Image: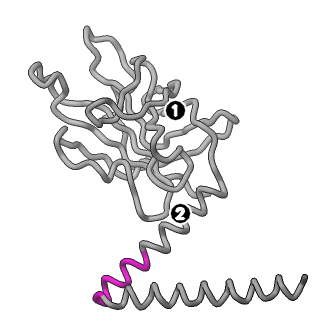
């Protein structure tokens, strides 16, 4: 029995080695720089996947931003019928994009909130524009564990601009990005003129 197990392990090792050689040969059929990029991407994605599988975070329940007095309940949303990220139903809440990373996991978790609500009613992200680089944001999950994020960058987007970098990352790090509408209201398109995005990184302990 032990001999059979040993033989299986040897055969598996030979197979994996041959497969690795095949991958390297395939990659080397392209340019050297292209090969390095592909190998780096493959390794990064594998490590990120393994990390997420090892430490699957619980669902977020509260978002806290002390500087602008935000302490909001988290709703879970997906995509609208036209393929855009949905928004929170309650103007006092934030919406976490549940098809992406969870806050605290490797990747870019995304939360959206309203600002400039009709009739002057206060909304959760009315003061998001007041944040500066270095400010801290806190996300509490359903187990009561709090993850701390630090603002790295703040950027304004046109509604039609490519904002894929808001929802994805390949650096193997943990991010949380916050989105709200800013600018003037367009009655024709029924949307605000710009999107404000606050990019944050998980605080290193």
Q: CA distance from mark 2 to mark 1?
A: 24 Å
The single residue placed furthest to the top in the displayed view is 119
Q: Position of residue 12 (x, y in %)?
A: 68, 83
Magenta stretch: residue 7 in it? no
Q: Earlier in the sequence, mark 2 or mark 1?
A: 2
Q: Which residue bears the numbered disc 1?
A: 63
The single residue placed furthest to the right in the displayed view is 1
Give the extent of the magenta segment. Answer: 30-40
Residue 96 against residue 2 in the figure, above or below = above
10 Å neighbourhood of mark 1: few (<14), some, or many (≥20)?
A: many
Q: Secondary structure at mark 1?
A: strand
Q: Secondary structure at mark 2?
A: helix
Q: Position of residue 100 (x, y in %)?
A: 45, 45
The image quadrant that residue 53 belongs to is bottom right
Q: Which residue bears the numbered disc 2?
A: 48
Q: Position of residue 89 (x, y in %)?
A: 40, 19
The single residue placed furthest to the left in the displayed view is 188
Magenta stretch: residue 36 in it? yes
Of residue 61 and residue 15, the one placed in the foreground of this image is: 15
């Amino acid at each position: 029995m032990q001999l059979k197990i040993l033989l299986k392990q040897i055969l598996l090792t030979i197979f994996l080695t041959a497969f690795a050689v095949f991958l390297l040969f395939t990659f080397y059929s392209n340019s050297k720089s292209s090969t390095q990029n592909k190998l780096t991407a493959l390794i990064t994605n594998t490590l990120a996947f393994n990390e997420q599988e090892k430490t699957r975070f619980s669902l977020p329940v509260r978002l806290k931003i002390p500087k602008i007095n935000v302490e909001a309940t988290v709703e879970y949303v997906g995509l609208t019928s036209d393929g855009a990220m949905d928004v929170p139903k309650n103007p006092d809440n934030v919406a976490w994009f549940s098809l992406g990373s969870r806050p605290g996991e490797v990747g870019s978790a995304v939360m959206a909130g309203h600002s400039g609500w009709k009739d002057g009613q206060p909304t959760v992200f009315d003061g998001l524009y007041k944040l500066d680089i270095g400010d801290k944001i806190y996300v509490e999950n359903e187990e009561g564990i709090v993850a701390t994020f630090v603002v790295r960058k703040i950027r304004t987007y046109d509604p039609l601009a490519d904002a894929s970098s808001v929802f994805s990352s390949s650096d193997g790090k943990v991010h949380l990005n916050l989105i709200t509408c800013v600018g003037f209201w367009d009655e024709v398109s029924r949307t605000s003129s710009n999107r404000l995005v606050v990019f944050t990184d998980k605080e290193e302990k």
